[in-house]
Image: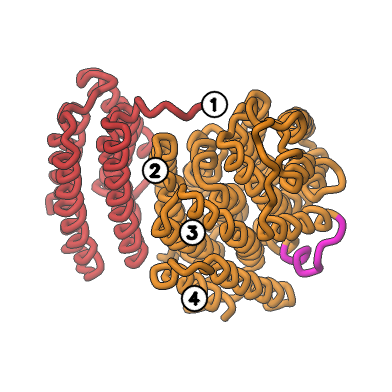
Amino acid sequence: MHIDLFLFGIMAVTFAMVIAKRMSALINAFAAQSFFLFLVTLSLAVRSGHLDLYIVAVLLFLLKVLLIPYFLKRVVKKIKVKEDLGLFINPAVSVFLAMALTYMAYLFTVKFISIQGKIENSEFFVSLSVALIGMFIMVFRQKALAQIIGLMVMENGLFLSAASVSGGMPFFVEIAIFFDIFLCVIILGMFVYRINRIFTHIDVDKLTELKG
Amino acid sequence: MDIIVILVIQLLLAVSPTFFGKHRNFGYFNAAGYLLSLIYSLCLALSIAKGVGVISLFNFFYIDALSAYFILTISLINFASSVYSIKYISGDVEEGEISASKAVKYYSLFNLFALSMYFVTVVNNLGMVWVAIEMTTLVSAFLVGFHNNKMSIEAAWKYIIICSAGITLALLGTILFYYTASRDGGVNSLNWTDMMSVARKMDPRMLKIAFLFIIVGYGTKAGLVPMHTWLPDAHSQSPAPISALLSGVLLKTAIYAILRYTAIINKCVAVHYSSNLFIFFGLLSLGISAGFILVQKDLKRLLAYSSVEHIGVIATGLGFGGAAGLYGALFHVFNHAVNKSLMFFGAGYVVKKYKTGDMNVIRGVMGTMPFIGTVLILGAFALGGSPPFSIFVSEIMVIIAGFRAGAYLPAVLALFFLAVIFGSLIYHFSRIVFGKRPQDMQVSACPFSMKFISVFLFIFICIMGFKMPWFFNKLLVSAGNIIRGV
């Protein structure tokens, strides 16, 4: 199968998220990233023939490609805030930093994680860079919603890394983690509503009442 | 079977508010449920200490001395907090602070939170431990944001975002543990028991990296510096009984998770690797929290930073290691849980009465609430580690273990920080407890539930240092042995 192609897709979309300036672009990119992840999982399922992996792939498609992006878009529509993400750092510098993170992930994979098989190796390297870039998005974007997406991107990265190093976690753990993540998004979304109602904005860098 | 009973009780408690939550006496019913859980966890601890050793059910639940000890601690603090909640919440409803339906919501979340904490300690599968710890975050976020004002929403948002991000790193650590277990050990399982059985075959280099992710990831939830930033916000903004649960036991469940991994890595990598990490994070937590306690202005934030300090003591003790260090650190888990929940209970009424947590405003608690004033000043001495009380005993065990292990500089540093913290705690608390009470403030009676639970907890603070029940001692020793792998 064309796993390397899908991996390339994941990387490309992840970099698109780094330069995204608008909320809707970020959500769409997240959906696309999840879709490529779904393709990777599906290829793994076809290759190994495990029923578990098929179920995981279908769940991934339903939750991360359809439900979560739909839910986030609904939140955006409901709270009617300005669409722009409020970048702390401009896109050019962001891309540069993301590249540095990717290189770090590469070095880490080559030095410490010696996985047999070229594809698995690059899978792990891609997954680690996706996780790091997810963290980057969480830290350097001001909007509460962008932080949720950063968290989801991190989760996507880890999902891929689990798939690459060991063909996925045991089945019921995988299901439990999916359930957890879904709940997490719903709850974070509810808090975004509350923040918007009480503060009339969702800029997390302005949440500074508590200190010391 | 005790563990099934405990979980079923918790499950029933979690759904019961939906049906009877509006009833006037629901709080009493709830506390009775927690009493039952406490009794069953005592039975569980007894049967494990008596020689059953390990209980394993359906290849899913796994309870050994380490889990039984944490279950006992959780049950005790849950019970105390549920008793305290009775009057605290009904008082809030009577004063119109919260509506009756909000009180129902409070009890459902409280019980769900308790259930998720139990779950962390009873499952064998490390993946499920991760899921359970994430569940504790998700449920308790609503409790942190319970008052729904600017500050509590900010605290809840920080809490859930920082802890979720941290715990994602712990998931990466878990994946790496799983990877080396399946590649080098040949078991395709996340069960702790399976991993322990192949621990010697694992790749030490991989384990070192994985453990780093684990200690940073779960350390975020445990409140180790520098990942502690959510902690003072969350603990100061949630209702007092919830602060007690967060400080007393939630942080400890994260420590529990770290300990499970420590047991694995200690079998494969020389012990000083994990020890050095623990000492590093422990001393950092002690040092930073000492500074913040010294200059603190808010009563509940003061207690929150003191939790950071005590997590630091626990981590340092784990780092000093040896039988004595682990014994002291684990004993400290219990002592801190008991003492800190007592302090939060007292602080809850102080903040309610004075309508502020500002320690420059609060004066003369002894005059306005004599019982709570007494509790706070005695509790402050105990919390700082003054001699007759139990925290003194566990802290001295940790320090002695440090000297014995030859870690002179860390032990001296820890002593120094503890001394600074002791001084500042006594300074702050004597300022608010004594002094002239505001003239417009009436003397108010303390509800019986608060008196009962304070005395109940205070008995533990006073006697555990001198004489502990035999099974408690046995649990501590065998839990230490599990971590050391002997």
Q: What residue would you read off at disc 2?
A: B148
Q: Are marks 4 and 2 in contact (CB under 8 Å)?
A: no
Query: Can you tell which of label 1 and label 2 is closer to the viewer?
Result: 2
User: Label 3 is placed on what type of residue?
Assistant: Phe
Image check: B304 left or right of B230? right
> Which circle's residue, 4 or 3, is located before the other in the chain?
4
Query: Can you tell which of label 4 and label 2 is closer to the viewer?
Result: 2
Q: Write the start and end of the magenta stretch as one range.
A: B466-475
User: Label 2 is placed on what type of residue?
Assistant: Asn
- Are tags 1 and 3 found on a single chain? no
> Which circle's residue, 2 or 3, is located before the other in the chain?
3
**Please, what secondary structure does the residue beneath circle 1 have?**
loop
Rounded to the nearest angstrom, the CA distance separating label 1 from label 3 is 28 Å
Q: Are marks 1 and 2 in contact (CB under 8 Å)?
A: no
Q: Which colour represents chain B?
A: orange
Residue B8, numbered label: 4
- Are tags 4 and 2 found on a single chain? yes
Q: What residue would you read off at disc 1?
A: A212
Tell me the subunit letter for badge 3.
Answer: B
Above or below B386: residue B192: below
Rounded to the nearest angstrom, the CA distance separating label 1 from label 2 is 21 Å
Quadrant for the N terminus of chain B, please. Answer: bottom right
